[in-house]
Image (spheres, rainbow, N blue to C red):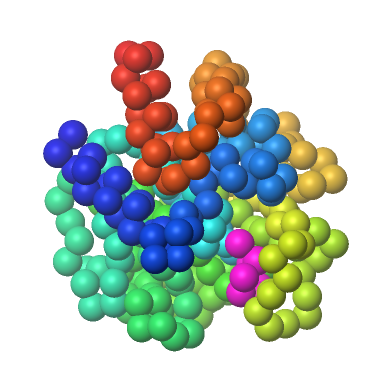
Amino acid sequence: MEHTQHNEELLKGLSNPKREEHARSLLDLIELRTFDLDLAAWFVSLVSRGASYITGSGPGGVGKTTTMRSLLSFVPEDLRFTIALPGEVSAIGGAPQCVISNELSDHPPPTYLWGQNLRDFFALSEQGHLLVGNAHADDLKEVHGQIVETNHVPESQFRRINLFVFICLEGGNPPGGRVKDTTTRRVINRIFYSDGVSEHASVYTPETGLTPDAPHDPEHEKSCRAFLEEALKGPERTLEGVRHRFQELKKQQR
């Protein structure tokens, strides 16, 4: 694919080479116990088939951006990554792409989307684009209020986001402010799913795990789990490295 290098370069740019840091991959998050293998494989199965997703948490520093980025390694190979920037979103068109918002928020910095920019972002779902982003919200009701009620995004476009994934600190989020304790374990708190048409339904809590309503492709999930198990044995942890290995596996399976 002509955009393979572009996508890998974008993922590489999410790391911080000056500080010798790499953006945490899904493998890192499994090792940190944010995900267990079964839940990680379920996510990979859906995202690799083209699911749009938004991650959320109330305070900053909980891990919504890290989780959002980690799943980019598994977006379908034929989709070019495009960052959605204010004033430029409405110009995105053409063949389906993976359109990424740094955040859906009225807070600074200026790369965040709100108002007309946010509406333009969600409108891209009707052109077949895969949408990825994150929001300052702890639950579906809160993020629905921000997107549909405050910004007047049509309900039909809101439902095209297949997965809303909420992250918290183990034991609950603090009452406010930015989380500074990097030793505290981040966990997936709630997941809501829509097939793109129906109202979102709760399909996961830490207490129940994935519910019977969660969509499943057992064979694909088994393959994704096997990939993750094998990848965890190796040293590669970069977003682009994990993506390259996963795409190589997909080619072998064709």
* Residue lying at 62% horizontally and 47% vertically, measured from the top left: 29
* Residue lying at 18% horizontally and 34% vertically, measured from the top left: 1
Front-lying residue, 140 or 234: 234
Tell me if residue 134 comes above or below residue 5 in the rendering. Answer: below
Q: Position of residue 113 (x, y in %)?
A: 38, 75
Lateral position of residue 207 relative to residue 157, left or right:
right
Tell me if residue 132 comes above or below residue 48 in the rendering. Answer: below
Front-lying residue, 128 or 104: 104
Q: Position of residue 46 (x, y in %)?
A: 50, 36
For the record, the magenta segment spans 57-63
Tell me if residue 177 comes above or below residue 201 in the rendering. Answer: below
Q: Quadrant of the C terminus?
A: top left
Q: Is residue 95 visible?
A: yes
Magenta stretch secondary structure, dominant = loop
Is 114 within the magenta?
no
Q: Position of residue 52 (x, y in %)?
A: 44, 48
Q: Count numbered badges in the picture.
A: 0
Is 60 within the magenta?
yes
* Residue lying at 30% horizontally and 62% vertically, measured from the top left: 83
* Residue lying at 70% horizontally and 37% vertically, measured from the top left: 36
Lateral position of residue 149 relative to residue 32, left or right:
left
